[in-house]
Image: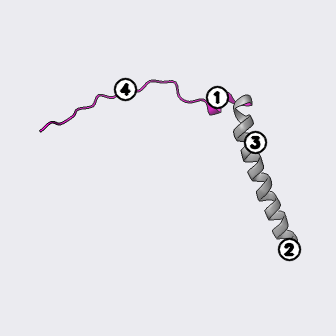
Amino acid sequence: MWRLIKALVLLAILAGIALVAYAYVGPLFFPGDFAAPTQEVSNPVTLDTN
Protein backbone atom coordinates (compact mmCIF):
# COMPACT_ATOMS: atom_id res chain seq x y z
CA MET A 1 0.00 0.00 0.00
CA TRP A 2 2.87 2.36 0.82
CA ARG A 3 4.35 1.80 -2.66
CA LEU A 4 1.07 2.86 -4.27
CA ILE A 5 0.93 6.08 -2.25
CA LYS A 6 4.56 6.87 -3.11
CA ALA A 7 3.87 6.23 -6.80
CA LEU A 8 0.82 8.52 -6.76
CA VAL A 9 2.77 11.28 -5.01
CA LEU A 10 5.59 10.93 -7.53
CA LEU A 11 3.13 11.11 -10.45
CA ALA A 12 1.50 14.20 -8.96
CA ILE A 13 4.88 15.92 -8.61
CA LEU A 14 5.86 15.01 -12.16
CA ALA A 15 2.52 16.29 -13.46
CA GLY A 16 3.08 19.60 -11.66
CA ILE A 17 6.56 19.93 -13.12
CA ALA A 18 5.22 19.13 -16.59
CA LEU A 19 2.51 21.78 -16.25
CA VAL A 20 5.02 24.45 -15.21
CA ALA A 21 7.38 23.44 -18.03
CA TYR A 22 4.54 23.67 -20.56
CA ALA A 23 3.61 27.13 -19.28
CA TYR A 24 7.17 28.39 -19.75
CA VAL A 25 8.24 26.50 -22.89
CA GLY A 26 4.85 26.19 -24.60
CA PRO A 27 4.78 29.68 -26.14
CA LEU A 28 8.09 28.95 -27.89
CA PHE A 29 6.80 25.80 -29.60
CA PHE A 30 3.04 26.49 -29.79
CA PRO A 31 2.64 30.28 -30.13
CA GLY A 32 -0.90 30.01 -31.52
CA ASP A 33 -2.19 28.33 -28.38
CA PHE A 34 -0.92 31.15 -26.17
CA ALA A 35 -1.69 34.15 -28.37
CA ALA A 36 -4.34 36.61 -27.28
CA PRO A 37 -7.19 37.32 -29.70
CA THR A 38 -6.31 40.22 -31.99
CA GLN A 39 -9.85 41.16 -32.98
CA GLU A 40 -11.12 44.52 -31.75
CA VAL A 41 -14.55 44.51 -30.13
CA SER A 42 -16.65 47.64 -29.81
CA ASN A 43 -20.15 47.73 -28.38
CA PRO A 44 -22.33 50.83 -28.09
CA VAL A 45 -23.25 51.80 -24.54
CA THR A 46 -26.34 53.81 -23.59
CA LEU A 47 -26.13 55.64 -20.29
CA ASP A 48 -29.35 56.65 -18.53
CA THR A 49 -29.38 60.10 -17.00
CA ASN A 50 -31.78 61.31 -14.31
Relative vertical location of residue 39 with respect to residue 47 in this rendering, above or below: above
The x and y percentages for residue 16 are 74, 52
Residue type highlighted by circle 1:
Gly
The x and y percentages for residue 25 are 74, 35
Q: Which span is picked out in magenta?
A: 29-50
Mark 2: secondary structure: helix
Mark nearest the camera among 2 and 3 is 3
Q: Which residue is mark 4?
A: 42
User: Looking at the image, which residue is at 76% across and 52% down?
Assistant: 15
Relative vertical location of residue 19 with respect to residue 9 in this rendering, above or below: above
Instruction: Measure the C-alpha gap from mark 2 to mark 3.
Output: 29 Å
Q: Which residue is mark 2?
A: 2
User: Looking at the image, which residue is at 33% across and 29% down?
Assistant: 43
Instruction: Measure the C-alpha gap from mark 1 to mark 2.
Output: 43 Å
Whether pointer 1 and pointer 2 mark residues with C-beta atoms closer than 8 Å, the reply is no
Furthest toward the bottom, the residue is 1
Furthest toward the front, the residue is 50
